[in-house]
Image (cartoon, grey):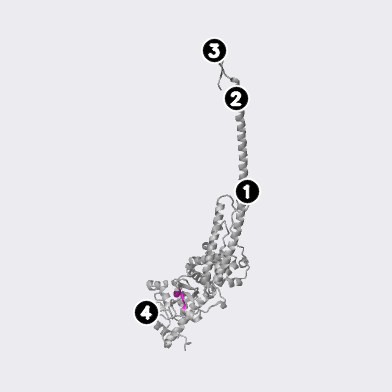
Amino acid sequence: MKAAVFRNEDGDEEEEEEEVCNVFDGESKRNNETKNLKGFFTSLLLMEEHEKQDQEARNAASRREMSDFQSNYRKRARTMSDYYSDLNDYYADAEESEDINLKKSRVSRAVASVAVAASEIEAESSEITGSGSVRGTGTGSGQQRRLWVKDRSRAWWEECSRLDYPEEDFKKAFRMSKSTFELICDELNSAVAKEDTALRNAIPVRQRVAVCIWRLATGEPLRLVSKKFGLGISTCHKLVLEVCKAIKDVLMPKYLQWPDDESLRNIRERFESISGIPNVVGSMYTTHIPIIAPKISVAAYFNKRHTERNQKTSYSITIQAVVNPKGVFTDLCIGWPGSMPDDQVLEKSLLYQRANNGGLLKGMWIAGGPGHPLLDWVLVPYTQQNLTWTQHAFNEKMSEVQRVAKEAFGRLKGRWACLQKRTEVKLQDLPTVLGACCVLHNICEMREEKMDPELMVEVIDDEVLPENALRSVNAMKARDTISHNLLHHGLAGTSFL
């Protein structure tokens, strides 16, 4: 503000500051500033209040949306699980029909779409739970998520697991006694046991083993196994393969092995008492297991002889086994195509390599059938026409040795009915399943498990004579000597007369 200028009597100019005006102006300015500050703080408080209300509204909307999403997710997961279970049931039924390939392709595409949808649902769930906003379905944040599982009845298996369950009924269902079953469970415990997870409780070892043995014993489709044990179809299929692999890895080295020297001596004496033929340490036989026509190498698995006899197209794979007098397998060769004759299966086996290269059977015989060649260690019956009495007598005694192997295979197929019909197991997994059946057969035979005679299967396998049946001059001479001794020392029978 400018100062006012006055002139006095002497003519001097005086300047008088307007102090009063300045005081009033300063006071007015302070009042205005105070009002402005009050208005600013009031606006700030209002803004914070509005922001708080908006945040609460957004949180409430988010909780409602999350609740709706979780409810929708559970419904979709439940529907998807039911649909997937129905597809598996349909797939199991489709494999038993004639148009299996067409139905299988349709079901595979449907299952693939279901799997994609399920993965998308799982991804959405993991994304939401991973953000930390909401976990679980309850009000508390400490609850663990649990995997929804279809409720299935386990009454039948719980009944079988009771201590007072009749031994006869248990043996009828599992083809073995309770004590043998418990022995197998104990030996497989470390190999098949699983730990509980946050999503579900692990299936007990006894139930895992029971699923596998019941499936092998009855040969029933997986959908019936699922209903018996209260588990999913895919779970049952997985358990069968896992337990069969454990049997192959854990039990096969213990219960299926080549005899030691003392055992070989006892076997020789037992076979000689049966047939009179010396130094026989095993009876060898090759049987066929029916399979579904494979997608690759179909011609190799085509079984011409079974097809002609049964008037139905047949495909198979082979099992070659050496059996001791008690019907226990001491050597196995599994998995060669059904079109391969017995002599070629023998040549592909590890037994053939060990016997030819390592002298495994030096001075001892494996008794084969007409489809096997005569070797330094393989003794076979005479197959030419117009046999002499001596040769007839020898063949009669050889048939008694061969009967041991055939009856062992009859008990194998009778005890494990899955070997009597085409199985759902894939071709690459089939040798493991067949090996498990042979190991379980050995355990039952070693423990002298009696089998119902009605379950016994008559083994019929057409044996084709090899192109080169006589491959050892020394073996020919030895066979002639054995034949002469059998007839002229009163050891041969007379039924051939």
Q: Is 155 one of the magenta-colored residues?
A: no
Residue depth check, mark 2 versus mark 1: number of the one nearer the observer? 2
Residue appearing at x 52%, y 71% in the figure: 102
Write down the residue under mark 1: 60
Q: Name the kind of residue labelled 1 in the image.
A: Ala
Write down the residue under mark 3: 12
Write down the residue under mark 2: 25
- Identify the element where label 2 is drawn: helix
Write down the residue under mark 4: 472
User: Where is residue 358, by image quadrant?
Assistant: bottom left
- Identify the element where label 1 is drawn: helix
Number of other residues with Cα within 10 Å of mark 1, as a class: few under 14, some 14 to 19, many 20 or more: few
> Percent position (x, y) of residue 462?
47, 80
Q: Name the kind of residue labelled 3 in the image.
A: Asp
- Identify the element where label 4 is drawn: loop
Q: Name the kind of residue labelled 4 in the image.
A: Ser
Question: Looking at this view, is 190 or 317 the one in front?
Answer: 317
